[in-house]
Image: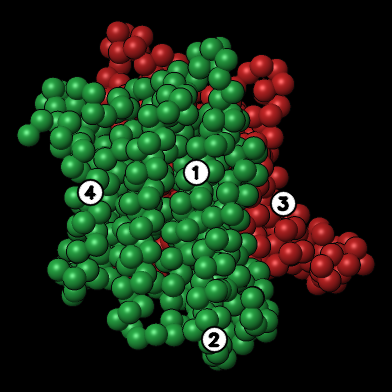
Chain colours: A green, B red
Amino acid sequence: MTRRTLAKALPPALVALAVLAPFLLPAYKAQLTFLWIMIVFALSWDILGGQTGYNSFGNIVFFGVGVYAAVVVQIGLFHDVAAYTAAAGTETLRFTPQQYFIGLAAGLIAAPLLAVLTALLLGWALLGLRGHYFAIATLGLGIAAGELAAAWPYLGGSSGVQVPVYPGSLESGRLLFYFLAAGLGLATLFALGGLYRTRLGLALNAIRDDEDKAEALGLHTTRYKIIAWCIAAATLGVAGGLVAHIIGFVDPREVAFAGASYGVWMVLMAILGGKGSLWGPVIGAALFHAMRELFWTYLFGWQNVAMGVLIVVVVVFFPTGILGWLRQRKPHWFARALPRAASPEESAP
Amino acid sequence: MDNLALLLQAPPLALQLVIDGVLIGSVFALAAYGMALVWGVMNIINVCQGEFVMLGGYVALYLARAGLQPLLGVPVAAAALFPVGWLCYRLVIFRIVEQDLFVSLLATFGLGILLSQVMNQVFGANVQSLDPGLGSWFLFQGLVSVSIMKAVACLVTLAIAGLLVLFMRRSRLGQAVRATAQNARAARILGVDTGRIYAFTYALNAAICGAAGALVLMIWTVQPFGGLIFTVRSFMIVILAGLGNLPGVILAALGLGVAEQFVGFILGAQLQIAFVFLALVAILVLRSRWLHRQRRYLA
């Protein structure tokens, strides 16, 4: 089989796999749902981090905005949010199934919109910063957002918000959110695959390779960076709305603005797979998710320590990732299939 | 906002906040000096700075529980953290010294997460503190109280800073560290073992953080996940002061301490953390805007 037929056969095969997976492995439906979310995390981080060379630790902000936007819009359409959050979980909301689904759809539309708006504002303020200063500023941003949400009584403060319960059976709810997550993952993957082949993708790679030269050639670099961040924000916003429903509870620091877990993991997954490529983050996310499940099963109690070790080991010993390593070993496999993977020297100006 | 009115009615309260801020800020200066040292010599932004501080606090806490005089915990914690820093260098940091700054940023961030998780596992997630029982001075008919421990912490900080400056200026090792910071290649040609200097610098930084941590334990609290905010404070102070500017570091640290006290008092302790992180973002953005106008970049 040549590479071209492989490339043609891959998307339909992936879609078929995504559709069949929950029926083939019904016991692992929850893990599979989260796998798609992880893939979205890694892919969306890689837009700015890998392709553009701007490493952000703060993309979790858009996720958190999506989480809160989806939940607040869904509740707010039919109920009083402030009264509900003030009751802190003692009050259960009653939704008819119709109300629930209208609210769900509205929430999942509002989430990316609000996230993109946040990205526009933050991008305008922050994307003039270069390299590691941008990284550290975004690190501060993620934690500040969590603390602000925890101090805002309308959003339930630090005690969080209980997400409305799915009206149907437990099983159908799980299946629904699996397919929503899988749909988001596949849509992100294919959309980014198309996007990286356009002029926008070239512009982003040009910024990564040499921002000053790109600017001298007439690219509005800040504008491109903001566009890239907005795309990441949109996908993360939807992911946030889905995760709120999958977990069923919103905590400001542990779920919505979980900078030390999801926020770092999305960076790690992209690096593990090979940043600056389309498939690297997907591979990284799958591998990382499997490792994480193993840690949780076999190292219970010490799983977070093991994650810390994993971060250090991957970053220090394996910075080019799986695809980067394969590129060095088997360059002919990659003749034109992938955009150039960023080597560490090239990623920062 | 009620507290703002209170502040205007009773000016001595403002004095209280300023004194607390200055005394706490001096401890920030210690951690910030360590960060500037590592940054200047090794070109690494050490994101696990705060975790070293917390670890120093735990060392002092357990020694005090074992019967050691709390103030003696400061040098002992420093001595205990020195080999920890050396080990971190020999295991991880030496692989990233020559690499891109983002790699070191992420690696030390990962190291910080690892350290905080280990501390959480070993020491428990509780917030810990230690009162050395030195009491307080009262001014203005008891309206303003100055904790003697905080004053002692400030003096200890000044003493450590003075010792460090003397060490850097006078000793051969200190001179070698400064030479490596100025030009690592030239220093290597002239016979300085830069690898050892890096290891020493990193370990010295850990020791400084350990001393700061023992002080933080006595004037404030330590907890496994409380490290990152100290890192951010240090980073902010170094950015404000610039590298290799000790008076600037101290001034910025005191300013930050005072600002935090005021924000914590007026807006509530809950927003104090948010303030620190937002101030970091604001400082970076404003500074970069200011440099942009001169056609320069923050780099």
Residue on which the image places disc 1? A231
- Residue at screen point 65% across, 44% down: A121
Identify the secondary structure beneath mark 4: helix
How many numbered marks have been drawn onto this rendered protein structure?
Answer: 4
Marks 4,3: beta carbons within 8 A: no
Residue on which the image places disc 3? B259
- Residue at screen point 75% across, 58% down: B262
Task: Quadrant for residue B59, please give it.
Answer: bottom left
Mark whose residue sits in front, 2 or 4: 4
Q: Residues within 10 Å of mark 4 (few under 14, many from 20)?
A: few
Q: Quadrant of the N terminus of chain B?
A: bottom right
Mark whose residue sits in front, 3 or 1: 1
Residue on which the image places disc 4? A12
Amino acid type shown at disc 3? Ala
In this rendered view, identify the residue nearer to me: A52 or B288: A52
User: Label 4, label 1: how many angstroms apart (C-alpha)?
Assistant: 24 Å
The reply to whether residue B159 is visible in this rendering is no
Amino acid type shown at disc 2? Phe
User: Label 3, label 2: how many angstroms apart (C-alpha)?
Assistant: 47 Å
In this rendered view, identify the residue nearer to me: A348 or B222: A348
- Say whether residue B43 is left or right of residue B283: left
The answer to whether dots 3 and 2 both sit on one chain is no
Amino acid type shown at disc 4? Pro
Q: Residues within 10 Å of mark 3 (few under 14, many from 20)?
A: many
Residue on which the image places disc 2? A95
Marks 4,1: beta carbons within 8 A: no
The answer to whether dots 1 and 2 both sit on one chain is yes
User: Label 3, label 1: how many angstroms apart (C-alpha)?
Assistant: 37 Å
The answer to whether dots 2 and 4 both sit on one chain is yes
